Every structure is written in structure tokens, then in C-alpha cells.
Image (tube, rainbow, N blue to C red):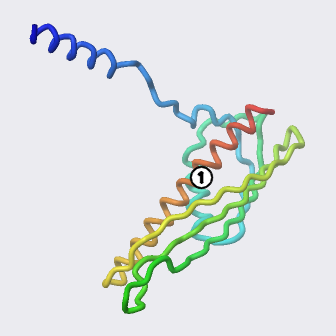
């Protein structure tokens, strides 16, 4: 009896784990060509977002040419202090406003995306700066993925 239940359990786990679900690659859905990419605001964050967008868009379609105006604002706030009134954690908030102009369709849309995170302050200043840089890269990647997702939705709606 125990062997039958064990075999049924193993077979059901094997069948359920191989359901055939495959993560959809969004870059294959990105059927547009960025003709121009203008940016204002925080230069480092804009640079990271631009690189992420350009790396993820591989399909160029002449029918969906777009111009992107990117404006980012980075705010750095104190999140926590210890009992000695020393800063132990910072919070970074990045707000991006993206204006998308579809050249061939004479349509423009404005997308607003915000992302935030925090990082620890450690005794070594170089490590603290490294923590900040890693957080900024992560937040820029999240924003670029959101921009790409919204662009795909906008293009499919047109």
C-alpha cells in the first residue's frame, strides 16, 4: 500500500512540475524603433535607463517609430538613525516621466513611473557608495522594464 501511494505521489509531482509554462520574452513583443531618446534630470539614472532600453529592444519596425523624452528626479532621504543620531539607512526615490511620441500615428502619451529602495550605511565609505550604486542600478532596471512593458501595451492598443 505504501509503495502505491509513494509512486502516485512521485508521478503527480513529476507531471505537475513539467506543465510546459514558459516565460514570455518581452523583447520579441517590442516591435518599435526608437528614433530619438532625449533625457533631462539625473544624468546617471538616465544613462542607466537608456542603456537598459536599448539593450532590450532588438526588433526594429519602421511602422512604429517613436521619440522618447525621459525626465527623472532622484530624491535621497534619511530613512533610519541609531540611538547616537547617526544615519544607518538611506532611501532613494526615483520618479520618471516618459513622454512617448508615435511619429507615424501622431499620438503622444505620458507615462509616470516611480521606484524606491533603501540601502545601509556601513563604516567603510567605499562600501556605502557601492551599496548606493547597486541600488540605483537596480531601480533603473526596474523603471526600464516598466517603461518597456507600458510601451508594448501602448503599441498593442494603437
Q: Is residue 113 above or below residue 42?
A: above
**Front residue of this view, candidates 6 and 33:** 6
The residue lying toward the viewer, choosing from 139 and 88, is 88
The image quadrant where one finds the N terminus is top left
Left or right of residue 65, residue 46 in this image: left
- Disc 1 designates what residue? 144
Position of 19 relative to 70 (above/below)? above
Image quarter for residue 39?
bottom right
Can you tell which quarter of the image residue 120 is in?
Answer: bottom left
Seen at 77% across and 32% down, the residue is 157
- Classify residue 52 as left or right of residue 23: right
**Res 12 → quadrant:** top left
Instruction: Give the number of marks.
Output: 1
Residue 144 spot, x, y in % from top left: 59, 52
In the figure, 16 relative to 148: above or below? above
**Residue 87 image offset from top left, x and y in percent:** 43, 85
Residue at 62% over, 35% down: 59
Quadrant in which the C terminus is drawn: top right
Measured as percent of width and height from the top left, residue 10 is found at: 20, 16
Percent of width and height locating residue 146: 61, 48
**Residue lying farthest bottom?**
84
Q: Is residue 70 left or right of residue 143?
A: right
Q: Residues within 10 Å of mark 1 (few under 14, many from 20)?
A: many
Amino acid at each position: 500500500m505504501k509503495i502505491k501511494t509513494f509512486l502516485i505521489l512521485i508521478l503527480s509531482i513529476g507531471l505537475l512540475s513539467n506543465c510546459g509554462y514558459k516565460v514570455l520574452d518581452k523583447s520579441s513583443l517590442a516591435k518599435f524603433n526608437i528614433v530619438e531618446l532625449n533625457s533631462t534630470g539625473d544624468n546617471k539614472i538616465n544613462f542607466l535607463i537608456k542603456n537598459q532600453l536599448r539593450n532590450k529592444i532588438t526588433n526594429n519596425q519602421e511602422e512604429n517609430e517613436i521619440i522618447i523624452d525621459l525626465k527623472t528626479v532622484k530624491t535621497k532621504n534619511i530613512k533610519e538613525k541609531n540611538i547616537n543620531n547617526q544615519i544607518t539607512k538611506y532611501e532613494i526615490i526615483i520618479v520618471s516621466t516618459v513622454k512617448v511620441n508615435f511619429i507615424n500615428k501622431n499620438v503622444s502619451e505620458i507615462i509616470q513611473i516611480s521606484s524606491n529602495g533603501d540601502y545601509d550605511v556601513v563604516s567603510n565609505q567605499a562600501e556605502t557608495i557601492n551599496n548606493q550604486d547597486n541600488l540605483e542600478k537596480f531601480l533603473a532596471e526596474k523603471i526600464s522594464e516598466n517603461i518597456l512593458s507600458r510601451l508594448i501595451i501602448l503599441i498593442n492598443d494603437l
